[in-house]
Amino acid sequence: MGSPRIKGDRLSFHVDGVDHWADATSVVMDGEDLEVPDMHGEVKLIRLRSWFDVEAVQSTAAASLWTFCWEHQGQTVPFAYAPHGNPLPTEDQPHFTGVLTVPLAPRLGGSAGRTTEQTFESRFHIVQGPLRVTTTE
């Protein structure tokens, strides 16, 4: 029996208290690690920095993620990421929380076409966390 998998249709990405799951087409939490040798010659990995690579629909609507980024460039705001989309964190389906920096203004526009929809990509740097949350207490 395998482990339960994360499904792409159940994402929750709260930024500053608002869930932007409907705008996001992809959210990937990632980071950069550094190998550091200790005094005994053993190599340890430490996380230098973490971030979210986000792809989302372009929308100039007031409640859109695009507009939030436009209006909050460079600000630090709280986040909560639930890759399983579950409303409450559990041991098997945790949430990840912390503080991130809103990137500079995302791109706007793209290719022309009757059925073409525009998206943007941005990197949201995590400045505090991420903290793995497994309980509501």
Image (cartoon, rainbow, N blue to C red):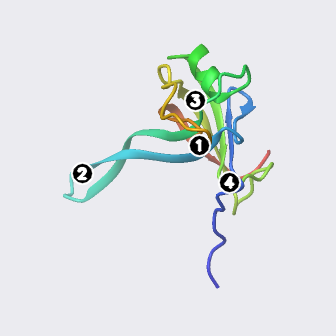
Indicate the quadrant containing the N terminus: top left, top right, bottom left or bottom right: bottom right
Q: Residues within 10 Å of mark 3 (few under 14, many from 20)?
A: many
Which amino acid type corresponds to the residue marked 3 in the rendered image? Val
Mark 3–mark 1 Cα distance, whole angstroms, equals 10 Å
Residue 122 in percent (x, y) is at 48, 33
Which residue is disc 2 drawn over? 38
Q: Residues within 10 Å of mark 1 (few under 14, many from 20)?
A: few
Q: Earlier in the sequence, mark 4 or mark 2?
A: 2
Which residue is disc 4 drawn over? 94
Residue 104 in percent (x, y) is at 47, 20
Height in image: 38 above or below 2? above
Query: Please, what secondary structure does the residue beneath circle 4 have?
Result: loop
* Label placed on residue 131: 1
Q: Earlier in the sequence, mark 1 or mark 4?
A: 4
Residue name at image x 65 percent, y 22 percent:
60
Q: Are marks 4 and 2 in contact (CB under 8 Å)?
A: no
Which residue is disc 3 drawn over? 99
Which amino acid type corresponds to the residue marked 4 in the rendered image? Pro
Mark 2–mark 1 Cα distance, whole angstroms, equals 25 Å
Which amino acid type corresponds to the residue marked 1 in the rendered image? Leu
Q: Earlier in the sequence, mark 3 or mark 2?
A: 2
